[in-house]
Image (cartoon, helix red, strand yellow):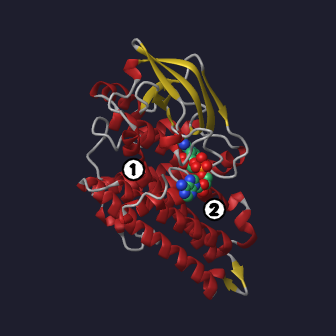
Amino acid sequence: TFEHLTSDFYGYQNLLTDREKNALTELREYLDAEVRPIVNGCWERAEFPHQVIKPLAKLGMYSYSWPETAPFTNSAVFRGFVALELSRVDASVATFAGVQNGLVAGSISACGSAEQRAEWLPKIASGDVVGAFGLTEPLSGSDAARGLQTTARRDGDTWVLNGAKRWIGNGTFSDITIIWARDVADEQVKGFIVPTDTEGYTATKIEGKISLRTVQNADIVLENVVVPETLRLQEANSFKDTAKVLRLTRAEVSWSAVGNAVGAYDAAVAYSKTRMQFGKPIGGHQMVQDLLVKSLGNITASLGMVVRVSQMLDEGTQRDEHSALAKTYTTSRMRESVAWCRELFGGNGIVLEYDVARHFADAEAIYSYEGTQEMNTLIVGRSITGQAAFI
Ligand code: FAD
């Protein structure tokens, strides 16, 4: 099925089962038919295409990862290829699914009680409940653990939340937002499932983005927001538990980074065969081939890395520094590759219609979110030297 994809140069998709390959084909057909035609318009208008939420749910985008909801037993490598396919078409749609599935369902799966998992994961899987993940604050991004200032105060059977969150993806329209807040009693970071219609909760869209414009990021303010103890994530007792979620999502974002580069590369290969200069397709010029081959080298090296990191997840050996290395490496290689692919288009490379401009611009947000290049480097640095350089 995948022979036509030069971007999977070493055939990593051969690791998948037939069932996984079929599911991926089904996803690709949906994305090509329904999503690809609308993404440039959505990006230009900075609008989210709400019509994709339910079809993506039917395709398993928010359920494959969790035993409670998975339509069939599948591998982390398969789920990585799912993230790649989404991002290959549009990194904003991939980010929506990554938040809904990885960050929101992931928080509930990793930090919720059995009852909370049973209650929320099916609603998230079906897309009936759309979630957001509120960790970053106006004054704390990289320093999310130590700098987190949103407070949670226990009051009988309820908690009272106060503070502000920034950059929260899906935040303008989510039904629930996972809010990470510091318990004033023991000073530990805890997680809360906050219904967004709760009094005192407001979300305002961040305007004027030049990257992932389709993702709706919000500034959130919490003023005496009251939630019951039943909505506190029962297994989130400190930031170490939050970090468990981020380890998983960083690996998925690495796959997404490869997908965003593949989207640019696919477009560049196609363009190199049709654009004529000096009497032949530009793909026949040596330096244009160099741009394509360097991009393919980056993609292939990155793919090898994310495949292995996903295998380590299934083997139970994946640690924070493994996904951090994948995040820092693949996003750096993506950033180089999308620039080379954009270059190949000449002037047309800055026009949305040719797709490559969107992949080029979206690379910037992927490079910085879920831990910047520097922070993920320092997580790996701590692991290999035994010295933490960032605290
Ligand atoms: P800062 O932490 O202010 O960093 C600024 C610069 O300083 C960076 O280059 C950084 O690497 C560097 N720096 C900081 N400390 C050090 C150090 N010790 N050593 C070396 N360099 C350092 N957050 C959420 O909670 N939920 C979301 O859904 C979400 N979605 C996002 C979507 C988008 C499109 C974007 C752009 C961000 C999103 N974020 C979200 C926030 C994101 O995770 C943060 O932007 C990111 O962690 C970086 O934090 P910051 O922007 O505050 O940068």
Amino acid type for the residue under numbered disc 1:
Arg
Residue at 39% in and 57% down: 323
Secondary element type, mark 1: helix
Quadrant of the rendered image containing residue 192: top left
Residue 37, x across and y down, in percent: 61, 51
Q: CA distance from mark 1 to mark 2?
A: 25 Å
Q: Nearer the viewer, residue 188 or 136?
A: 188
Q: Nearer the viewer, residue 288 or 233?
A: 233
- Left or right: 374 as drawn, with respect to 154: right
Q: Quadrant of the N terminus?
A: bottom left
Q: Nearer the viewer, residue 129 or 277?
A: 129
Furthest toward the left, the residue is 315
Q: Nearer the viewer, residue 160 or 208?
A: 160
Quadrant of the rendered image containing residue 141: top right
Residue at 54% in and 30% down: 150
- Left or right: 314 as drawn, with respect to 46: left
| Residue 360 tag number | 2
- Left or right: 335 as drawn, with respect to 112: right
Amino acid type for the residue under numbered disc 2:
Phe
Q: Is residue 213 placed above or below 113 in the rendered structure? A: below
Q: Which residue is mark 1?
A: 247
Residue 187, x across and y down, in percent: 44, 31
**Could you tell me if residue 177 is visible in this image?**
yes
Residue at 40% in and 25% down: 232
| Residue 277 tag number | none
Q: Residues within 10 Å of mark 2 (few under 14, many from 20)?
A: many
Q: Nearer the N terminus, badge 1 or badge 2? A: 1
Residue at 71% in and 41% down: 207
Q: Is residue 152 placed above or below 254 in the rendered structure? A: above
CB at disc 1 and ligand 1 closer than 8 Å: no
Residue 79, x across and y down, in percent: 37, 52
Which one is in front in this view, the residue at disc 1 or the one at disc 2? 1
